[in-house]
Amino acid sequence: MRAWSLLTDLFNPDQINAELDKKYRDTYVKISIGNSSFYGRYRGFTDEGFYKFKTASNDDITLVADTDAVISYEQIKLGLYNTIDGAMVVHTLPHRQWKRGLCDKNTAIESLFAHVVGGPRGNNFNKYFKDIFETPQAQEELTLAKALAILDTSNTTYTWALNRKWAVLNNIETDDPSVYHLCYYTTIVAKIKDKQILVTNDAFTQEILEAQQLFTGYEVIK
């Protein structure tokens, strides 16, 4: 029961199973077996003594009580992530303490575009969980030039994240396709045009200057 004791900080099997049911049922935890790691959604403990999980791809995973796997609740890095539908904002929800694994009750995945333009956000946790947490490309850091190149070649994506703090957005003010917006989290802070970053929100000038390694090849105009 070592893996389950470490996860729950308990030792009695009945208490462990009760805690798993209360804090982890229908939430994702990280499962590490040897050199392989993946997320599994806890589905419960069976009468036969097995711990059941579902992967983000809906595959069944069964672990025994004395499994050698390492089961952990991993704190996620909040911020901006890329998906097949562009940049998403990942943030925690209030009153989240009663569930410890990752789920739509304590974590929200919302469209950056909706945050910026004021449209309905919804919580797309189940739709994009696999995209964000099990796809390495979602978490890689990009330069501004590379992010803009992705936007230029996409017919369906309007936003793209450079890292957890910065993203670019297609022009939402005019029909000029050569103009883009630079976002710091969910706030538009500059316009991008002709290899220039034109600061439009002076409160974020310092943040832009400190991140210039991401903006190589572009001149910052304050």
Image (cartoon, rainbow, N blue to C red):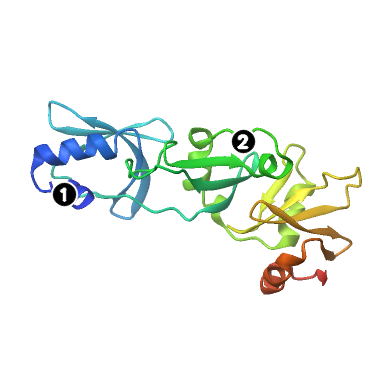
Q: Residue at x 81, y 61 (%)?
A: 200
Place of residue 157 in the rendered image (x, y in percent of width and height, measured from the top left): 72, 41
Q: Is residue 134 visible?
A: no
* Rendered image: mark on residue 50: none
- Horizontally, residue 161 falls left or right of residue 74, namely right
Disc 2 designates what residue?
121
Q: Nearer the viewer, residue 220 or 116?
A: 116
Place of residue 48 in the rendered image (x, y in percent of width and height, measured from the top left): 12, 27
SS at mark 2? loop
Q: How many marks?
A: 2
In which quadrant is the C terminus drawn? bottom right
Q: Residue at x 51, y 48 (%)?
A: 91
Asked if residue 97 is positioned above or below residue 200 in the image, the reply reads above
Q: Nearer the viewer, residue 187 or 29?
A: 187
Disc 1 designates what residue?
5
SS at mark 1? helix
Place of residue 83 in the rendered image (x, y in percent of width and height, measured from the top left): 60, 43
Q: Residue at x 71, y 73 (%)?
A: 209
User: Dot 1, crowdedness within 10 Å: few (<14), some or many (≥20)?
Assistant: some
Q: Are marks 1 and 2 in contact (CB under 8 Å)?
A: no
Q: Nearer the viewer, mark 1 or mark 2?
A: 2
User: Dot 2, crowdedness within 10 Å: few (<14), some or many (≥20)?
Assistant: some
Q: Is residue 210 visible?
A: yes
Q: Which kind of residue does numbered mark 2 sit on?
A: Arg
- Horizontally, residue 183 falls left or right of residue 173, namely left
Place of residue 12 in the rendered image (x, y in percent of width and height, measured from the top left): 8, 44
Q: Which kind of residue does numbered mark 1 sit on?
A: Ser
